[in-house]
Structures are given as structure tokens and as C-alpha cells.
């Protein structure tokens, strides 16, 4: 439903996006995940036609955003990161005004407002001024604004940001409901949020794509990873040992993570088609012993979005390239 290809965007010397490509399939909730500054909002502004990329393109429902931004915006309901609120306006008046910007008049406009009020559970506050509402309600008004023209695609930029846990839960179930029959792209830097809400994830780091795919598939990658901790007397021998572990047939990435007291920790990814977990443990154990190390821990990585995210962050796009070149 959304295709993004080779998106590039710089602000002066900051490369907000350095060539990002991904897909958002129809009828699913896709999470756009990344730390602050990763490029999520820039990506979303390009998709919604509010920012023009330096290079690359986006298609929404087959329509090129650069060629027909108006039609693309008709397809999309957009909740910006900081939704503009007209604090003085009552909720109903604001929604009516926004509906008229979509060209809705008379009965159609009223029907659209009523439907959005019902969908976002705003009945009790429809005559209150937006500025007087709690943050959770303001966010629901933002969501109501986004669905007035009944778009097939929803793009939500950090919808849970700044909400308390109760409001986050409410917003999550609201998003789930609004997602029925729609395609949703929702950005967040909060891992449990994405883990609970999304079918699929796109992970960005420093303007680059780290991973994309069905959440379950990405998590399953953790099944083919061991966590290894070993104590070394000297720093160079730890590096040699990491190289020796990397040289074992079937071992993919060896990601070192600094630890105190002469203990090194690595995540060791492996290809189960080439080497079984038992053989891998044996090989790692003997290689480390040969390097003069005392193995402290050698266990299977537990699959969670957090461990996946940490692994990707440690690895980084540059390390990933270095790894594939080695
Ligand atoms: P995220 O939404 O993931 O936090 P952003 O897309 O907002 O990330 O920002 C990505 C990078 O681009 C950051 O380094 C940010 O400071 C920079 N950036 C974003 N928008 C602008 C802008 N309008 N002017 C200058 N720099 C910007
Ligand atoms: Mg942002």
C-alpha cells in the first residue's frame, strides 16, 4: 500500500535519511521504529507529502506522492508528531472545520463529524474547548481529525508520546479499532508499544534501514543467536578470539559489547542449516579456551523486540557492512 524507495533527505550537514526503502502492505499495522533522531518523522512527512525528498520516491496506493500529492493526501489520514490544536475551538467545531477542508459540506460534513466522534469516543467532550482537554483526549481529537475523510491509510507519528500509561492503553486499543479495514503506519521509539500494536516493523537507525518484516519473523531471528561472555587477561586476545569465533563455519555476525572487569560479551548469530547449536557451543568453547579465555556464559538469546533492537543498534548499518565484507 505504501512503497518507499531510496529516500534521501538532508538538512544542511545532517543526513536525516540516507537512502531508505521499505514497504507497508495493505490491511496491516506496520510500526516505524527507531531512536529519537533516527528519521521517523522525516520519513512520515515525505509519505504524507509535507516534505519533498532530495532523492527517492514514495507511492501510496500506487500513486506517486511527488506527482499527485493531493490524491495521496486524500488516501491518508495523518496524525503529525505535535498535532496542531486550535485550543479555543470546541471539539465539534474543530472537526467540522477540518471536514470542510476536505470539501465536505452540509449533511455529509455532519455525518463525517459524528462518525469520527463516535469512533474516537469523544461524545462526552464534543462541546468542550480543545485547549481544556487532557492530553489523552487531545490525542483522540487528533485521531478523529485524521479519519474525517475516511482514508484507507492512517499514518500516525508517535501517537502515544507524552501520554500516561492509562492513556497509552486507551490510545492503543483505539488505534487497533481504527486499523480495522485500513492500512496503518505508526511510528514510535517505545518498543513495547510497537510489540503490542504492530504486525510488521520497519526499523530505522541514523537515517538508514536496519530491518523490516513481520514482527514474528524478525523475532525468530533471535532463535539463531547465542549470547557469549568470556573473561580475558588481555584486550588483544579478546579481539583475536572474536575473530576465531567468527571464523567458525556457519557463524554470521559476532557483535562485541564492552563489559567491565576484563569480561567481554558477544552476540553470535549462526546459520542452523550449517551448524547445530550443540556443535557451535563446542566450537566456541574450544576456540575461546585456546585463546586463553574463561567462558562465563554461553546461552541462547531470548527473542524479544528489545533484544532485536539492541542487536541492530549495536550492529549499526556501518557494522553490518563491515560484517558482510569480512
Ligand atoms: P525522529 O522522528 O526519528 O526522531 P526526525 O526525522 O525528526 O527523527 O529527525 C532526523 C534528523 O534530522 C535529526 O537529526 C533531526 O535533528 C534532523 N531534522 C529533522 N527535521 C529537521 C529540520 N526541519 N531542520 C533541521 N534538521 C532536522
Ligand atoms: Mg519524530
Image (cartoon, rainbow, N blue to C red):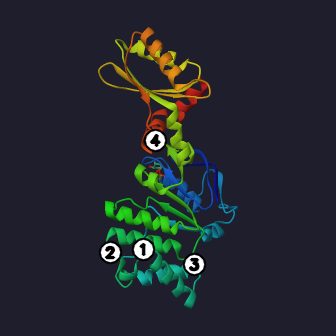
**Cβ atoms under marks 1 and 2 closer than 8 Å:** yes
The residue indicated by pointer 4 is 309
246, above or below 146, in the image: above
- Using the numbered discs, state the Cα–Cα distance from disc 1 to disc 3 in whole angstroms: 16 Å
Mark closer to the chain start, 2 or 3: 3
Q: Is any part of residue 190 visible from this angle?
A: no
The residue indicated by pointer 1 is 141
| Quadrant where the image shows the N terminus | bottom right
- Residue 133 is labelled as 2
- Residue 102 is labelled as 3
Report crowding for label 2: few under 14, some 14 to 19, many 20 or more residues within 10 A (C-alpha).
some
Residue at 61% across / 71% down in the picture?
Answer: 74
91, above or below 179, in the image: below
306, above or below 284, in the image: below
Mark closer to the chain start, 1 or 2: 2
- Using the numbered discs, state the Cα–Cα distance from disc 2 to disc 3 in whole angstroms: 25 Å
Q: Kindly tell me whether mark 1's CB lies below 8 Å from ligand 2.
A: no
The residue furthest front is 278
Residue 83: x, y in percent?
Answer: 43, 67
> Quick one: SS at disc 4?
helix
- Using the numbered discs, state the Cα–Cα distance from disc 1 to disc 4 in whole angstroms: 32 Å
Mark closer to the chain start, 1 or 4: 1
Residue 15: x, y in percent?
Answer: 52, 44
Report crowding for label 3: few under 14, some 14 to 19, many 20 or more residues within 10 A (C-alpha).
some
Amino acid at each position: 500500500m505504501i512503497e518507499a524507495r531510496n529516500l534521501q533527505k538532508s538538512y544542511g550537514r545532517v543526513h536525516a535519511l540516507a537512502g531508505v526503502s521499505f514497504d507497508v502492505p495493505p490491511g496491516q499495522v506496520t510500526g516505524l521504529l527507531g531512536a529519537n533522531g533516527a528519521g521517523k518523522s522525516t520519513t512520515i512527512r515525505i509519505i504524507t507529502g509535507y516534505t519533498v525528498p532530495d532523492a527517492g520516491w514514495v507511492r501510496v496506493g500506487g500513486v506517486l506522492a511527488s506527482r499527485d500529492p493531493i490524491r495521496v493526501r486524500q488516501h491518508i489520514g495523518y496524525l503529525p508528531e505535535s498535532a496542531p490544536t486550535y485550543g479555543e475551538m470546541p471539539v465539534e467545531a474543530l472537526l467540522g472545520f477540518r471536514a470542510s477542508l476536505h470539501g465536505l459540506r452540509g449533511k455529509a460534513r455532519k455525518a463525517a463529524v459524528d462518525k469520527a466522534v463516535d469512533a474516537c469516543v469523544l461524545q462526552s467532550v464534543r462541546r468542550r474547548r480543545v485547549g481544556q482537554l487532557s492530553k489523552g483526549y487531545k490525542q483522540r481529537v487528533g485521531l478523529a481529525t485524521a479519519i474525517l475523510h475516511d482514508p484507507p491509510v492512517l499514518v500516525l507519528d508517535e501517537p502515544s508520546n507524552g501520554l500516561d500509561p492509562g492513556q497509552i492503553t486507551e490510545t492503543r486499543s483505539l488505534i487497533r479499532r481504527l486499523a480495522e479495514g485500513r492500512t496503518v503506519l505508526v511510528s514510535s521509539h517505545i518498543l513495547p508499544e510497537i510489540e503490542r500494536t504492530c504486525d510488521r516493523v520497519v526499523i530505522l537507525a541514523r537515517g538508514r534501514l536496519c530491518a523490516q518484516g513481520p514482527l514474528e519473523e524478525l523475532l525468530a531471528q533471535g532463535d539463531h543467536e547465542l549470547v557469549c561472555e568470556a573473561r580475558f587477561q588481555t584486550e588483544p586476545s579478546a579481539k583475536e578470539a572474536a575473530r576465531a569465533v567468527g571464523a567458525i563455519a556457519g557463524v554470521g555476525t559476532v557483535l562485541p559489547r564492552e563489559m567491565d572487569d576484563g569480561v567481554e560479551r558477544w552476540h553470535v548469530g549462526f546459520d542452523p542449516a550449517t551448524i547445530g547449536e550443540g556443535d557451535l557451543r563446542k566450537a566456541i568453547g574450544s576456540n575461546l579456551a585456546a585463546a586463553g579465555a574463561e567462558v562465563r556464559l554461553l546461552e541462547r538469546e531470548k527473542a524479544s523486540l528489545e533484544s532485536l533492537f539492541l542487536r541492530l543498534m549495536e550492529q549499526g548499518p556501518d557494522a553490518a557492512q563491515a560484517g558482510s565484507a569480512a
